[in-house]
């Protein structure tokens, strides 16, 4: 499962901004480097020709080429090469509102010469620390038993039709951002 071309922007140096845990803010060329070879997921920045690596507990929020990211402590869906680390997870913000949608990126070693880059879709109610993974298919390195659609369905109480679709994994991953956005805008499915 290689990431689609559009998502690759986060993994190459691109203009970005950052906010550190100590309150410092700045701009630099940034990229996301997924956990591999005993190193955790990090953000690498280059400014004035000097490279600096930020662990997820050092950087609280950042943007890369217009993609917004935040750290999430106690994230229970750590997977792949990221699973053994205790640092906060790094999540891309996709949608905010009554329901928030994030992408969690991780890497899985699939053989001696192949790494799979995986994008897991996670949702939550704003102001909470409880995330729910939506995973109607199979994601390498992720236990789908941790992600029943009925948990996600409960995030959408104002739309019973949408709840049924989530409970039966009837929303594809491609449809998910639009479904969450529509819900946040007050648009409801009709039976």
Image (cartoon, grey):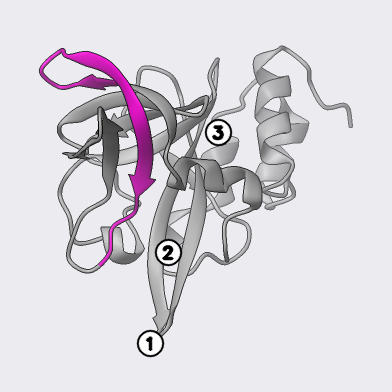
Instruction: Give the crowd class for mark 2: few <14, some 14-19, many >=20 residues within 10 Å.
Output: some
Report the side of 110 relative to 179 (left or right): left
> What's the mark number on residue 154?
3
**Which type of secondary structure does the marked residue at label 3 adopt?**
loop
Magenta range is 18-36
Q: Percent from the top left, x then y, of residue 59?
A: 22, 29
State how far apart marks 3 and 1 are (Cα): 41 Å
Quarter of the figure that contains the N terminus: bottom right
**Which type of secondary structure does the marked residue at label 2 adopt?**
loop
Give the camera-side residue of 20 and 73.
20
- Name the residue that disc number 1 marks: 112
Instruction: Give the crowd class for mark 1: few <14, some 14-19, many >=20 residues within 10 Å.
Output: few
- Name the residue that disc number 2 marks: 142
Report the side of 49 relative to 169 (left or right): left
Q: Percent from the top left, x then y, of residue 14?
A: 45, 34
State how far apart marks 3 and 2 are (Cα): 22 Å
Q: Against 10, is 97 above or below? A: above
Nearer to us of marks 3 and 2 is 2
Q: Is residue 120 magenta?
A: no
Q: Against 151, is 140 above or below? A: below
Instruction: Give the crowd class for mark 3: few <14, some 14-19, many >=20 residues within 10 Å.
Output: some
**Which type of secondary structure does the marked residue at label 1 adopt?**
loop
At 42% across and 83% down in the image, what residue appears?
Answer: 113
């Amino acid at each position: 499962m290689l990431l689609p071309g559009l998502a690759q922007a986060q993994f190459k140096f691109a203009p970005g901004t950052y906010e550190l845990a100590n309150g410092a803010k700045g701009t630099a060329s940034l990229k996301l480097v997924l956990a591999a070879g005993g190193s955790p997921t990090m953000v690498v920045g280059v400014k004035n020709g000097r490279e600096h690596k930020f662990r997820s507990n050092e950087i609280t929020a950042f943007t890369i080429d217009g993609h917004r990211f935040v750290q999430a402590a106690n994230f229970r869906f750590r997977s792949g090469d990221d699973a053994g680390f205790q640092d906060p997870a790094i999540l891309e913000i996709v949608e905010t509102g009554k329901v928030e949608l994030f992408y969690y990126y991780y890497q899985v070693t699939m053989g001696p010469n192949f790494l799979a880059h995986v994008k897991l879709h996670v949702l939550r109610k704003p102001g909470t620390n409880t995330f729910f993974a939506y995973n109607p298919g199979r994601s390498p390195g992720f236990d789908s038993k941790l992600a029943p659609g009925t948990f996600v369905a409960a995030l959408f109480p104002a739309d019973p039709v949408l709840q049924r679709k989530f409970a039966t994994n009837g929303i594809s991953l491609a449809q998910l951002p639009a479904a969450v956005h529509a819900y946040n805008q007050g648009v409801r499915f009709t039976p």
